Image (cartoon, grey):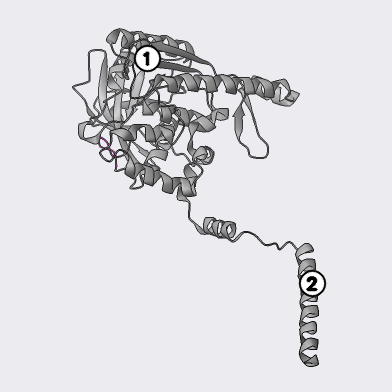
Amino acid sequence: MKFWLKLAGFVLIAGSIAGIVFFYFQKNTTYHLVSPIKEISLQTSEKKDLPLNKYTILNLKNYPYQASQIKLVKELDNYSTDEFRSYLFTYQTMAKTMSGVINLPFKVKTGDDNKPKVIIMIRGWVPRTSYKPGIGTQPAASVFAKHGYITLSPDFFGYGQSDPEPDDSWEARFIKPINVIELIKTIQDSGVPTKVVDPSLPSSISYLPSRSLGIWAHSNGGQIALTTLEILSQPIPTTLWAPVTAPFPYSILFFTDEMEDEGKATRKWLSMFEKDYNVFDFSLTKHLDFLTGPLQIHHGTADEAALKTWSDEFVAKLEKENKRREAVLATASAQVKSEVEKIGGYTDKTSSVFYPLSSISYTYYTYPGADHNLRPMVNWNQAVNRDLKFFEKEM
């Protein structure tokens, strides 16, 4: 009996000593216990491949954008007029072919550098079954072309004569700003056609680079345009018609009620995305600190496809961002203020990211009774004439 009592006492003492040693080890090393749930979550996150992170707005600032060459494929007789000629064109983006419609005026408007003035037209969503090049952009593009602007309307992948879009529907969405930026780089570096004798003979096409660029965008094209501007942080005059400016991913969920399954598959698809990714990294409303103007926004009060309240809220966010910039400038160093005066912002030395600090210049017009396409025509005409004055002033 005494033997067993002594053994029990020995075990108790040994256990206490082991506990003290364990506590000391815990206290004096970097090792510590963590929740099994958190630990599993961390390990899973580290092991997972997150390929879409390269398309976050911040990461796209460092994307290796490439310029290519605009090639004219054929004339589009159904669009050409006595004042301009329309052509199907192609260029390379992400090492694939993208097609679109280019309108070339007989009298090209030029800037002080005698280089052509160019407007990139970005359409909203269109079903593939009813799509043809120029849908959603050609009515406004023809007005701009008649006034001397060269206009280019990319089809985007999967439309027109473009290569197919990626199988991953998220990737297909996130790469559209890349496609627009590479078109911009192509126009700036390789030039845009200005005179054409025979589109089948490349040697008969005269190219001139252009630094005088503008953007026109409608509906979801507004989301693409604003994301493009945030990535570039360059003052490209941009006009937005009924833009989709709701936060991502609500901007997608809003449209799912018209689907046959009432959005069931989309919600599941979205929950899988949110499980691995931070949606704020892809949302334009969370990156207004990268945005520059000037902007012109048009929205009809009877728009049921992209709500006018979205533009109201977006404008309120622009005001909030402008006040934030004013507060930053009020306490900024003399060096930062000097940079802002010269280039409109400053470059963060740690991240090498450029932050605009000049106020975002914008004008917001509303149209009582106008729908998603700013119809009736009296509203449409007023909006396009305002755009002509906007581009004349800002370009």
Q: Position of residue 343 (x, y in %)?
A: 61, 23
Q: Which residue is mark 2?
A: 21
Rendered residue at 33%/43% (across/down): 264
Residue 175 appears in view: no
Indicate the secondary structure of the residue bearing disc 2: helix
The residue range painted magenta reads 158-163
Rendered residue at 30%/22% (across/down): 137
Q: Quadrant of the N terminus?
A: bottom right
The amino acid beneath tag 2 is: Val
Q: Nearer the viewer, residue 278 or 96?
A: 278
Question: Cα distance, mark 2 to mark 1?
Answer: 73 Å
* Mark 2 closeness class: few <14, some 14–19, many ≥20 residues within 10 Å: few
Outermost residue, left direction?
A: 78
Q: Nearer the viewer, residue 88 or 165?
A: 165
Q: Position of residue 330 (x, y in %)?
A: 71, 20
Q: Is residue 299 left or right of residue 284?
A: left
* Mark 1 closeness class: few <14, some 14–19, many ≥20 residues within 10 Å: some
Position above or below: 237 against 47: above
Position above or below: 66 against 153: below
Q: Which residue is mark 1?
A: 301
Position above or below: 378 against 189: above
Which of the marked residues, 2 or 1, is nearer the chain's N terminus? 2
Q: Main secondary structure of the magenta part?
A: loop
The amino acid beneath tag 1 is: Thr
Residue 258 appears in view: yes
11 magenta-colored: no
Indicate the secondary structure of the residue bearing disc 1: loop
Q: Position of residue 316 (x, y in %)?
A: 53, 20
Rendered residue at 58%/23% (across/down): 321
The dot on residue 25 is none
Mark 2 or mark 1, which is nearer to you? 2
